[in-house]
């Protein structure tokens, strides 16, 4: 006679076989080789361990098995479940549940489930050990001097790296799951008494509204759901793989989002000027940091406007003053100048993509082929003029000097747009292109923050701190546009007086 199911199918049954049948049907036990069930006897009662092979720490599981299998009947009776969870299992990260769907979700994220025959609840044990690489310095955010650790693909590691730098009791780490099928773990980090509560709630609301089956592309898919202008060519959030950069933004009042399986953290909100700064500027002396920052600004300008400006003055030599009349090609060659710049623009991007996909041992050979064979021969046969390759190379250098990889890709689109409108419409096209780009920048917003702040709306003090890398001791206020609860970063004026008085007292004692 078939056994009748006790209770609704979504709850744990007191009959062990029914629970295992549920997991077998849902997870394909016996078909999927990584879903394992280990039957055992615990104090004379039948039990089973269900877990994902590769997600669990084998040493911990072995110790738990040894402890459970050595239990006698008198060790767990008269209340087996309570005695197991509170006395007999020597493990910190343990909880219980009576919902089969919750148990299945917990198992799929790496936890181990213990069923006991005759009990209407199951034990959840966090014995996770995900495959993970070491926290190495990220390639896109390297420093000459500074910490060498970076985020990895495991969420809890990234949270730990951040909390190590933010030893603030106000740091909050909230978790949500996104994706109906993938159930991707997303962590929201902020400092409770600094971040604007409305900003935090806005971030949570947008994440909660994500409705899709899965997020295999992790943080990039999240970004496309939560930003206002999905078709904007400019990045509306900032990415970082450095824990120190994430910590600095937390102290400013930003909200950080981390996605499991991704080494990149999302910083929100982010303005255009967030993308043009780099941690290197704060790891050098003040004047050196200012110099490095200005060089970066120059590189960003070159990556967008140098080649279109050269194209404009080549088409309209009368725009140049007499002292600069040497600028411009002596011979255009067999291909129109406008087309040459378009070809060089596409060629640089093609070489960049080839460099990404080329194995390291062949990267040098690929660069020589691009520079010597293609470049030199193209000049000799009259396809390119030397000046076009010169300005194309300077544009590529400016692109690679842009701190934000996302902004550098956006600047490539701006560069191509400016080349096209300048080549087709000459001076009106160049001016019109500048106006269109400025309007696009001015109308962008990131979580309600104007994209060009502090230029628009104008804030002289904040803009000056962007132009000049100010010393940390005089950078006393957090960005006003973030509407932080605590505006002060440095000791208040009264506190400063107290410190000064203490120093005077020490001198008198001497």
Image: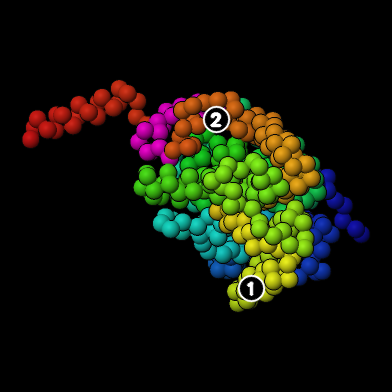
Q: Nearer the viewer, residue 376 or 93?
A: 376
* Residue 79 place in picture, x, y as percent: 62, 50
- Magenta region's main secondary structure? loop
Q: Quick one: label 1, few (<14), some, or many (20+) residues within 10 Å?
A: few
Left or right: residue 195 compared with residue 311: left
Q: Nearer the viewer, residue 121 or 411?
A: 411
Does dot 1 land on a helix, a strand or a loop? helix
Mark yes or no: residue 153 visible.
Answer: no
Q: Which residue is mark 2?
A: 454
Could you tell me which residue is drawn at 45 percent across and 34 percent down? 465
Q: Residue furthest front?
A: 322
Q: Quick one: label 2, few (<14), some, or many (20+) residues within 10 Å?
A: many
Compared with residue 187, is residue 111 higher up or lower down, i.e. above or below? below
Q: Which span is picked out in magenta? A: 469-489
Could you tell me which residue is drawn at 43 percent across and 58 percent down? 144
* Residue 483 on the magenta segment: yes
Q: Nearer the viewer, residue 181 or 398?
A: 398
Could you tell me which residue is drawn at 69 percent across and 68 percent down? 379
Quarter in which the N terminus is drawn = bottom right
* Residue 320 place in picture, x, y as percent: 61, 43
Q: Which residue is mark 1?
A: 372
* Residue 347 place in picture, x, y as percent: 71, 62
Q: Residue furthest right?
A: 1
């Amino acid at each position: 006679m078939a056994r009748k199911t006790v209770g609704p199918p979504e709850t744990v049954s007191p009959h062990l076989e029914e629970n295992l049948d549920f997991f077998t049907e849902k997870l394909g036990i016996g078909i999927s080789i990584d879903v394992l069930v280990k039957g055992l006897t615990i104090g004379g009662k039948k039990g089973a361990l269900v877990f994902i092979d590769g997600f669990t720490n084998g040493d911990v599981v072995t110790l738990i098995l040894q402890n459970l299998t050595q239990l006698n009947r008198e060790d767990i009776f008269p209340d087996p479940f309570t005695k197991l969870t509170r006395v007999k299992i020597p493990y910190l990260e343990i909880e219980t549940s009576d919902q089969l769907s919750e148990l299945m979700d917990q198992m799929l994220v790496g936890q181990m489930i213990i069923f006991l025959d005759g009990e209407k609840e199951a034990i959840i044990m966090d014995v996770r050990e995900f495959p993970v690489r070491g926290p190495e310095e990220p390639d896109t955010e390297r420093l000459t001097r500074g910490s060498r650790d970076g985020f990895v693909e495991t969420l809890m590691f990234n949270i730990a790296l951040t909390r190590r730098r933010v030893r603030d009791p106000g740091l909050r780490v909230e978790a949500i799951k996104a994706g109906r099928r993938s159930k991707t773990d997303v962590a929201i980090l902020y400092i409770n008494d600094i971040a604007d509560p409305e900003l935090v709630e806005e971030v949570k609301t947008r994440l909660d509204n994500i409705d899709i089956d899965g997020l295999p592309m992790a943080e990039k898919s999240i970004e496309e759901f939560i930003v206002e202008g999905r078709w904007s060519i400019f990045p509306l959030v900032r990415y970082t793989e450095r824990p120190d950069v994430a910590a600095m933004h937390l102290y400013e009042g930003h909200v950080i989002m981390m996605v499991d399986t991704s080494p990149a953290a999302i910083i929100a909100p982010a303005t255009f000027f967030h993308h043009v700064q780099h941690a290197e500027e704060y790891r050098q002396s003040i004047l050196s940091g200012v110099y490095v920052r200005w060089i970066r600004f120059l590189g960003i300008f070159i990556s967008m406007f140098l080649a279109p400006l050269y194209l404009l003055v080549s088409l309209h030599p009368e725009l140049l003053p007499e002292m600069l009349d040497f600028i411009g090609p002596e011979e255009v060659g067999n291909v129109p100048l406008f087309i040459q710049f378009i070809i060089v623009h596409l060629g640089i991007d093609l070489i960049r993509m080839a460099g990404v996909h080329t194995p390291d041992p062949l990267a040098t050979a690929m660069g020589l082929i691009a520079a010597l064979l293609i470049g030199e021969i193209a000049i000799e046969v009259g396809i390119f003029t030397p000046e076009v390759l010169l300005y194309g190379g300077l544009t590529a250098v400016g692109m690679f000097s842009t701190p934000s990889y996302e902004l550098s890709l956006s600047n490539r689109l701006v560069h191509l747009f400016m080349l096209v409108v300048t080549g087709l419409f000459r001076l009106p096209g160049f001016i019109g292109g500048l106006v269109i780009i400025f309007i696009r920048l001015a109308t962008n917003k990131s979580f309600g923050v104007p994209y060009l702040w502090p230029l628009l709306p104008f804030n002289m003090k904040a803009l000056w701190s962007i132009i000049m890398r100010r010393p940390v001791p005089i950078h006393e206020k957090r960005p006003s546009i973030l509407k932080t609860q605590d505006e002060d970063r440095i000791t208040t004026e009264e506190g400063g007086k107290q410190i000064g008085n203490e120093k005077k007292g020490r001198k008198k004692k001497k």
